[in-house]
Image: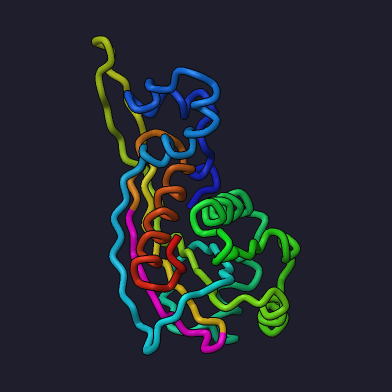
Amino acid sequence: MEKADFKSLTFWNQLFNCKSRLALVKSSWFLILFFPLLLGSCAVANLSSEVVAEQQQSYQRLFPVFVSGKLDLSEINEEVYDAHFKGKFNSFRDADLRLQIEEDMVRNIGDRQTIVVQGSKIFEQNSPVAYHDFLKRLDRYEVDGILVVNLDDYWRSSSAYSDDDLVIHDEDPNAKFYCYLVDRNTLKPVWMARSEVNGIAGGDGPLFFRLTRKVTKDLREKGFLASK
């Protein structure tokens, strides 16, 4: 997967390439308040999930982890951590995407009942962290749930539409994710989901924003997050 694939369009490209939806933006205050939601509406997501916990609970302090590549997670033991997380969950390469997901989760999940503990603020970037040191750091911040977001695949699809007899061609971003809510005590998933998100020429931002909204909604419906 080339790093260049993840480069978002400029602000104005994002604004004008989202077709008719973003044409509704008339004033600066509307843009500031609702631009993230408008971008999110420029992506379509489906999500299917499965509860695997024997006993459900609501998690109060979530730690989001973003990693790319193939991952079939049944437990976060030392071997799995070293193979899929060490040097990756805090890598410089994925720093922008990780920060975006963290901020989207803070926006959608964070409230007085649920705190999102951001890895970008408690772990040094691009520095390998040993398995037991990783767990000790989570315990220091009283993390009770680890929300793993795994980018499994990413591709672009071509599309075309007409605007005043002018045919405009776009390359729309798409992504497939696997997500796991892992209990800190057992280090095993209590909830799993797969999701495919299809964007509409709005850069990569809407993909992750839409995914986070879907994940949040499903976790609340399943009882893993306190209801607002």
Residue 219: image quadrant is: bottom left
Could you tell me which residue is drawn at 24 percent across and 10 percent down? 165
Could you tell me which residue is drawn at 38 percent across and 29 percent down? 18
Q: Is residue 45 left or right of residue 189?
A: left
Give coordinates of residue 52: x percent, y percent.
35, 82
Q: Is residue 87 covered in magenta?
A: no
Examine the rendered structure and indicate whether residue 82 appears above or below residue 123: below
Give coordinates of residue 62: x percent, y percent.
56, 69
Q: Quadrant of the C terminus?
A: bottom left
Give coordinates of residue 158: x percent, y percent.
30, 35
Range of the magenta residues? 185-196
Residue positioned most to the top: 164
Which sits in the foreground, 225 or 99?
A: 225
Examine the rendered structure and indicate whether residue 135 appears above or below residue 223: below
Q: Is residue 135 left or right of residue 171?
A: right
Examine the rendered structure and indicate whether residue 111 appears above or below residue 79: above
Could you tell me which residue is drawn at 29 percent across and 55 percent down? 46
Which sits in the foreground, 118 or 79?
A: 118
Q: Is residue 188 covered in magenta?
A: yes
Magenta span: chief secondary structure: strand
Could you tell me which residue is drawn at 39 percent across and 75 percent down? 191
